[in-house]
Image: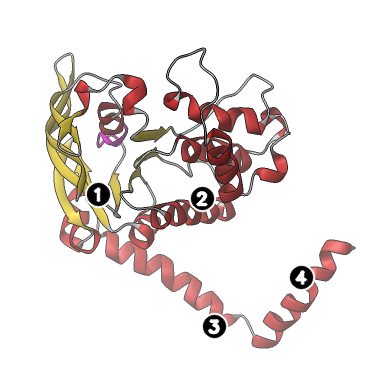
Amino acid sequence: MTLLSVTNLAVQYGGRKILDDVSFSLAEGRWLMLVGSNGAGKSTLVKAIAQGVPYRGSVCYRGEDVKRYRPHVLARHIGVLSQSHHVSYSFTVGEVVRLGRYSHAPGIFSQKQAGDERCVREALELTGMLPLAGRSVLTLSGGELQRVFLAQLFAQNPQILILDEPTNHLDLVYQKQVFALLETWLRAGKGRGILSVVHDLSLARAYGTDAVLLDRGTLIASGAADTVFSPEHLERAYSMDVYAWMRAMLSQWEAGREDFPAAEKDEGRQNKGVSKTQ
C-alpha cells in the first residue's frame, strides 16, 4: 500500500527554482533514500513534505492531501527528524521523549492519555536511553542526543518517519547504531515507512529498499534502489564515475587487510581489552 505520494512538486524562491516537477511514492514497509549532491534540493523536499515551505503540486498521505490535516493530526501520522538539535534547556531525557506524545493529546492542557507512558518507555528502551531517562540532555554526547530525539519520534508513533541526515556529524559507531535502530523500527510494526536524506551512498545502498536521486532540483530517477543507483544515473547526478570511485576506496581497505599479518591481528584482539584497563 502507498503511504506517501508526491506528485509534480515544485518549490521556487523568488525567481529561482529549487525543485521542479518531482514525483515519487513511498510504500508500506519500504525505506526510501533521498540522495543527490549538495544543492540538489533534498532538504527543501523534506521541508515541503513536512509543510515547512510553500510548494506547487501535491503531497498525499494514504491518498489524502496532507494540507487537509491539522498540524497536530498530521503529526500523528508523519514524524520529522531534523539534521541537528541545539538545546539550551535542562530537560531530562525522559521529559524530551515525552514531548513526542503531545500530538496525541486532545488539548494543550489535557491529561495524559492511556498508553502514553508505555509508548515513552518503549521508545527509551528501543534506543537504549532508558538508563539515562533522568539525565539532563545538556550532559549528553552528540550521538546520545540524536538518540533522544529519535526516541521522541518513536514515542510520537507515526506511520512515516522523515529524516534529514539522521547521522549528520556522528561518528561511525553512532551511524551504525542509528541506522540499525531505524531498521528495527521499520520491521517492528505494520503500515510503516521511512524517507531519509542521506549523503553517504554506501549507507543508502546498504539500508535503502528504494531511492530518489535528484540533481539541482530535477528528478534523475526514482524506484527500487538497485535501479536508481545505476552507474549511468549516478554519473549524471554527480558528474563523476561513482562506481569507479567506490571501488578505489574499497581496494584500499582490501589491500590493508592483506598487508596486516594474521599474527598481528590475533595479538591486536588479545591486547584490545588489556589496553583499556591499564
Which residue is disc 1 drawn over?
238
The boundaries of the magenta stretch are 39-43
Which residue is disc 3 drawn over?
258
State which mark lies toward you, 1 or 2: 2
The amino acid marked with disc number 1 is: Tyr
Answer few, some or many: residues within 10 Å of disc 2's Cα (few below 14, many 20 plus, some between 14 and 19). Answer: many
Q: CA distance from mark 4 to mark 3?
A: 20 Å
User: Going by the image, does 138 lie left or right of 155?
Assistant: right
The amino acid marked with disc number 2 is: Val
Q: Return the disc, 1 or 3, that comes first in the chain's sequence.
A: 1
Q: Return the disc, 4 or 2, that comes first in the chain's sequence.
A: 2
Answer few, some or many: residues within 10 Å of disc 3's Cα (few below 14, many 20 plus, some between 14 and 19). Answer: few
Answer few, some or many: residues within 10 Å of disc 1's Cα (few below 14, many 20 plus, some between 14 and 19). Answer: some
Question: Which quarter of the picture shows residue 23?
Answer: top left
Please tell me whether residue 226 is drawn above or below residue 47 in the rendered image: below
Image x and y of residue 178, in percent: 51, 50
Query: Which circle marks residue 272 in the picture?
Result: 4
